[in-house]
Structure formats: C-alpha cells, structure tokens
Amino acid sequence: MLLGATNRPWDIDSAAMRSGRFSQKIYLPLPDAPARKFMLEKNMKKVPVEKGFDINKIVSQTEGYSGADIEELCDRAKDEPLLEAIKTDKIVLVSNKDFDRVLETFPPSVTEKEVKQFELYNEELGLRTKKTKK
C-alpha cells in the first residue's frame, strides 16, 4: 500500500497520475467550521483560559486557515501568557485577546487564488472530495 500527499498535485509527473498508480485520488479542502472548532479544542484542551473564552469567535475568525495554520495560531496565542507565567511564577490565562493579537499578523497560509486552483484541478480530474469532520 502506498499513500501520498501533496499540496501541488498539478506538479506531479503525469505518469504517476495514470490509472493503476494510485487507485484513489481525493481532494481534501480546507477545514470547515466544525473541523476548525475540533482542532482548536484539541490544541487548547489542557490550556487554562479566561472565563468567557469564546472558541466560536476564533472559529469564525479562522475561515480559510489550514490545520497547520490553526495549530500554529494556538501555539503563538499561548506564547505571551506562558512567558508571563514563567516570569511571575503564576498561572496566566489565555484569552481571546491573545488570539486577536496573533491574528492581526498571521494570515492563512493558503491564498484564495490557491484554493481556486485546487478546486479547478479537482473539477478537471473529477476527484472525490473528502468532507472534513470530527
């Protein structure tokens, strides 16, 4: 069994894409809102957060973000509270403001142009689309 993944399928040699090489080709779109919420919850599971922390706000702010982007976003949002906790030797809670601060300078890594290119490629080849879910 061979499993391959790429974020540039149009650059793969056509011989590797012929029938019989890979039995299935599946397009995985960017995560939808429920998938992003799941990823955020997973990344923030053991993190102390402020009362009133609104994960749904972050879900709505991260439309177009990849799974790797969401993981990086969470890591960056935890940085300042962690450094403050180390400095003060007290628990510092992560807040929505920490995420807002990071989101100001951390755009999604996949552009709209790239998403359209993936979708066009997907349509041209008639690839199955794998829906994201928990």
Image (tube, grey):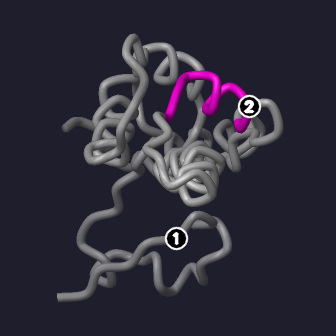
Distance of label 1 from label 2 (alpha carbons): 31 Å
Residue 54, given in percent of the width and then of the height, sits at 42, 15
Tag 1: amino acid: Thr
131 in relation to 85, above or below: above
Mark 2 falls on what kind of element?
helix
Residue 27, given in percent of the width and then of the height, sits at 41, 51
Q: Is residue 121 visible?
A: no
Q: Of residues 50 and 58, which is closer to you in this image?
A: 50
Q: Is residue 89 visible?
A: yes
In terms of image quadrants, where is residue 32?
top left
Q: Is residue 95 magenta?
A: yes
Q: Of residues 43 and 7, which is closer to you in this image?
A: 43
Magenta segment's dominant SS is helix
Q: Which residues are magenta?
A: 94-102
Quadrant location of the C terminus in the rendered image: top left
Badge 1: residue crowd in 10 Å (few <14, some 14–19, many ≥20): few
Where is mark 2, residue-wise? 101
In terms of image quadrants, where is residue 104?
top right
Quadrant location of the N terminus in the rendered image: bottom left
Residue 44, given in percent of the width and then of the height, sits at 36, 42
Where is mark 1, residue-wise? 6
